[in-house]
């Protein structure tokens, strides 16, 4: 079964991992990026050619040059990475937010892949998730389809501004929802999407149990710690 991303839509994969400061500093950002790049390249047959490292947009001649730069850095020095492929506008983002905050003792890491105008094989998504889990042991994740003008962080459509740019109207509730992702290992989930990667605490949710009992969704084990919950209408 394929998920279609037509009419300039993105197929989006998001993963979240709860961390304290010590585990954030030990997070395997380089291995995580390697897994994401492999999946990315297989989908669009291209590699990223625009890069943002630790919120600094710098011109690198190639992905190899970018990789050379991050090899010089320790795990705790890799705070944020964003990589884009300009022609397709597909991207990878890895954000280790606790490392640029002095006030937090725990938070979450988010990994986002947005792949534009492609068909994603559901089985391939799950294979990618298995490989990703082996390197970073995420706690939660999901797949969704999004329009081209979309705020991938807050999951809101962007509109044209008075000055001709694009902006999403982000509310306090949107910010609060994202802040609650710190509790993904304790049963918090953002929504029920066409495909969800859940831990055992999520299965205690009455909403999720109702979906399973009503045959709206199918539950399968991805590995010993993560389950895949997907819509029976999609597969």
Image (cartoon, rainbow, N blue to C red):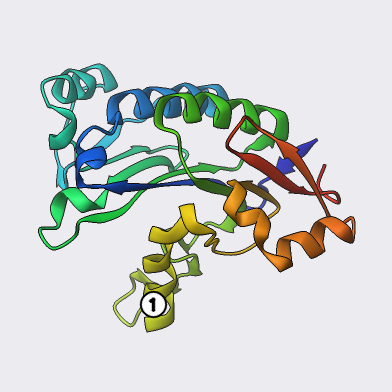
Q: Along the line of sight, which residue is nearer the eye, 122 or 61?
A: 122
**Residue receiving disc 1:** 170
Place of residue 1 in the rendered image (x, y in percent of width and height, measured from the top left) = 80, 35
Q: Is residue 27 left or right of residue 2?
A: left
> Can you say whether 44 is above or below 148 in the image?
above
Is residue 8 visible in this depiction of the protein? no
Is residue 96 visible in this depiction of the protein? yes
Q: Secondary structure at mark 1?
A: loop
Residue 22 appears in which quarter of the rendering? top left
Q: Along the line of sight, which residue is nearer the eye, 79 or 185?
A: 185
Query: How many numbered discs?
Result: 1
Identify the residue at horizontal 11%, vertical 21% (top origin).
72
Viewport quadrant of the C terminus: top right
Place of residue 18 in the rendered image (x, y in percent of width and height, measured from the top left) = 37, 49
User: Pointer 1: residues within 10 angstroms few (<14), some, or many (20+)?
Assistant: some
Identify the residue at horizontal 33%, vertical 83% (top origin).
162
> Can you say whether 195 is above or below 172 in the image?
above
Q: Is residue 157 left or right of residue 105?
A: right
Q: Is residue 99 left or right of residue 114?
A: left
Q: Along the line of sight, which residue is nearer the eye, 78 or 61?
A: 78
Place of residue 167 in the rendered image (x, y in percent of width and height, measured from the top left) = 37, 72
Place of residue 166 in the rendered image (x, y in percent of width and height, measured from the top left) = 37, 69
Residue 65 appears in which quarter of the rendering? top left
Q: Along the line of sight, which residue is nearer the eye, 39 or 25?
A: 25
> Can you say whether 186 is above or below 136 in the image?
below
Residue 64 appears in which quarter of the rendering? top left
């Amino acid at each position: 079964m394929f998920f279609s991303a037509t009419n300039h839509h993105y197929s989006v994969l998001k993963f979240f991992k709860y961390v304290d400061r010590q585990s954030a500093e030990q997070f395997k950002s380089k291995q995580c990026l390697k897994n994401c790049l492999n999946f990315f390249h297989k989908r669009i047959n291209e590699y990223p050619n625009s890069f943002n490292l630790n919120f600094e947009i710098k011109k690198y001649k190639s992905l190899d040059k970018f990789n050379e730069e991050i090899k010089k850095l320790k795990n705790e020095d890799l705070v944020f990475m964003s990589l884009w492929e300009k022609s397709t506008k597909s991207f990878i983002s890895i954000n280790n937010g606790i490392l640029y905050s002095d006030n937090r003792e725990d938070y979450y890491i988010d990994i986002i892949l947005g792949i534009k105008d492609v068909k994603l094989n559901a089985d391939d998504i799950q294979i990618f998730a298995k490989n990703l889990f082996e390197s970073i042991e995420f706690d939660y994740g999901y797949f969704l389809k999004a329009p081209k003008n979309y705020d991938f962080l807050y999951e809101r459509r962007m509109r044209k501004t008075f000055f001709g740019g694009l902006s999403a109207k982000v509310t306090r509730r949107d910010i609060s929802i994202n802040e609650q992702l710190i509790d993904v290992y304790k049963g918090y989930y953002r929504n029920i999407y066409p495909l969800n990667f859940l831990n055992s605490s999520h299965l205690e949710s009455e909403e999720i149990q109702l979906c399973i009992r009503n045959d709206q969704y199918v539950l399968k084990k991805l590995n010993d710690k993560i389950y895949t919950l997907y819509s029976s209408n999609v597969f």
